[in-house]
Image (cartoon, grey):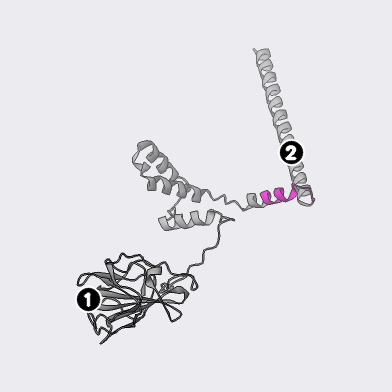
Amino acid sequence: MSASKLRYSSRNEKTDSAKGHGIAKKFAFQTLASVCILGASVFACNSNFPYSENFKTYIKRSLNVSTDISKVKSAASFAIKKSGLDSIEVIKNIDDRLNEGNVQNPEIPSESDAEAASEKIEPPSETAPEIETVKNAPAETTPQTNPDAMPAFRNPTEGKISSVFGGRVHPVTGADGNFHTGIDIAGVMNQTVISAAEGKVIKTGEDSANGKYVIIEHTGGYTTAYAHLNKICVTEGEYVDNNTKIGQMGESGIATGVHLHFEIKKNGERLNPENFVLYKHK
């Protein structure tokens, strides 16, 4: 009986000895490996090899990583609750376990804090251009066109030519050799008259000869005039395009019927409007 106990005791002692020896070897190996890694790290940090800078950066980032487990648990708990998954029993149990143990009075980040954190983590784009914001910028009030360009003229109203540009017999006085400074386009009362091209209204008015009239300044030194209107629909200083209603046809001033007297000038010289617009003759 004693011999059996002796043999049993001897086996246990051998087993314990082997375990202790194995632990000692493992500890010695880990210590040696740690010393080698530490030595290699110190050597790499003090050398100028091609990859040494990347290694230094990696070490710095590793040392700057937060190891506060309470913040990790708080963030995970907040994410679960925010997503609505805390209603699921399995997730709820995990959330409960996160709030147990050494996490006391965790500070749950607010939604604004979470958004701010995500904005800080995301690196800025290196290729994105800087956008400069102009506050309360004044609206453009002038057309962006070439000041020397010839305007793209169009017919200012519908109708047919009742009197041409140049010498004629005056329709009212009957005097011969009268020079007609534009063309007359016959139409109906209050027929729409538009600007023949984009430009700026430089004058509106009324006199005994022309009746109610509008004068518009265009690019390239051109101006247009519209006379004998029944109504003026624009004001001086107003910018118009080639589809803006500037007035309504009439027979104000010296006129024998409802028509539009239309003129075109370049640098003050009167031109034949039929070279710029297309109308049939009566």
Residue under label 2 = 33
Instruction: Assess disc 1: are there few (<14), some (14-19) or many (≥20) residues with their C-alpha within 10 Å of its C-alpha.
Output: many
Residue under label 1 = 250
User: Is the stretch drawn in magenta largely helix, strand or loop?
Assistant: helix
Reply yes or no: does residue 53 show up in magenta: yes
Q: Quadrant of the N terminus?
A: top right
Measure how far apart labels 1 and 2 are at the Cα level: 105 Å
Reply yes or no: does residue 145 show up in magenta: no
The mark total stands at 2
Task: Give the answer, above or below, for where 153 lies relative to 238.
Answer: above
- Give percent across and percent down for residue 182: 34, 76
Instruction: Assess disc 2: are there few (<14), some (14-19) or many (≥20) residues with their C-alpha within 10 Å of its C-alpha.
Output: few
Q: Quadrant of the C terminus?
A: bottom left
Disc 1, SS: loop
Question: Image point 43% across, 69% down: which residue?
Answer: 151
- Give percent across and percent down for residue 174: 25, 83
Residues drawn in magenta: 48-59
Task: Give the answer, above or below, for where 172 lies relative to 272.
Answer: below
* Marked residue nearer the N-terminal end (1 or 2): 2
In the rendered image, the residue lying farthest to the bottom is 208
- Give percent across and percent down for residue 147: 48, 73
Amino acid type at image mark 2: Ala
Amino acid type at image mark 1: Gly
Question: Image point 53% across, 53% down: which residue?
Answer: 122
Depth check, front residue: 59 or 139: 139
